């Protein structure tokens, strides 16, 4: 067994230092495989977090909504549906939206 190198004096005592720092010799991203696995896991965690905080809407039946003509654009239909949901929410027929993870934790 090789004794650690002794360098310098400190208040009359010997100071021992390791011959090298292990993180310099073998960094975490040393191999492409480690880099790929680490970045893939990081991307998966970020994607899962994004998915978990997306808003979800509870099921509710909107019995009557605004009538739209057959020639109405998709944007007009979406506005009518949003207005019907907001009216049902104000009447108490539907619950408010919440983050998806709230369903997972109860």
Image: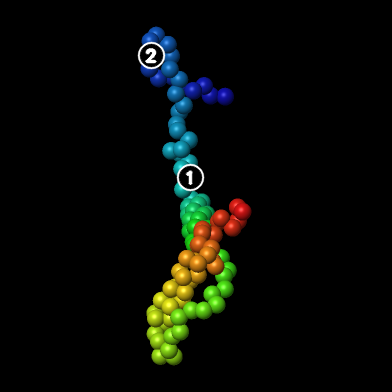
Q: Earlier in the sequence, mark 1 or mark 2?
A: 2
Q: Name the mark on residue 10.
A: 2
Q: Name the mark on residue 96.
A: none
Residue at the extreme front: 91
Percent coordinates x, y for residue 96 in the rendering: 50, 62
Q: What residue appears at the point 50 percent right and 67 percent down from the top-left corner?
A: 91
Q: Name the mark on residue 28.
A: 1
Whether residue 36 appears in this view of the structure is: no
Name the one closer to the observer, 39 or 11: 39
Q: Is residue 83 above or below residue 27?
A: below
Name the one closer to the observer, 86 or 29: 86
Question: On the image, which quarter does residue 11 sit in?
Answer: top left
| In this picture, residue 31 sits left or right of residue 103 | left
Q: Is residue 11 above or below residue 65?
A: above
Percent coordinates x, y for residue 7 in the rendering: 40, 20
Q: What residue appears at the point 46 percent right and 48 percent down from the top-left corner?
A: 29
Q: Quadrant of the C terminus?
A: bottom right
Question: On the image, which quarter does residue 75 sit in?
Answer: bottom left
CA neighbours of label 2 inside 10 A, class few (<14), some (14 to 19), many (20+): few
Q: What residue appears at the point 48 percent right and 79 percent down from the top-left corner?
A: 65
CA neighbours of label 1 inside 10 A, class few (<14), some (14 to 19), many (20+): few
Name the one closer to the observer, 95 or 36: 95
Local secondary structure at mark 2: strand
Q: What residue appears at the point 54 percent right and 59 percent down from the top-left corner?
A: 100
Percent coordinates x, y for residue 99 in the rendering: 51, 58
Name the one closer to the observer, 88 or 36: 88
Residue at the extreme bottom: 70
Percent coordinates x, y for residue 102 in the rendering: 56, 55
């Amino acid at each position: 067994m090789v004794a650690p190198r002794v360098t310098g004096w400190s208040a009359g005592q010997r100071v021992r230092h390791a011959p090298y720092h292990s993180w310099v010799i073998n960094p975490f991203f040393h191999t492409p495989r480690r880099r790929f696995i680490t970045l893939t896991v990081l991307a998966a965690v970020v994607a899962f977090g994004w998915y978990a905080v997306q808003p979800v809407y509870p099921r509710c039946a909107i019995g009557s909504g605004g009538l739209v003509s057959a020639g109405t654009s998709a944007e007009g239909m979406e506005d009518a549906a949003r207005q019907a949901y907001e009216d049902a929410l104000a009447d108490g027929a539907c619950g408010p939206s919440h983050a998806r993870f709230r369903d997972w934790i109860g």
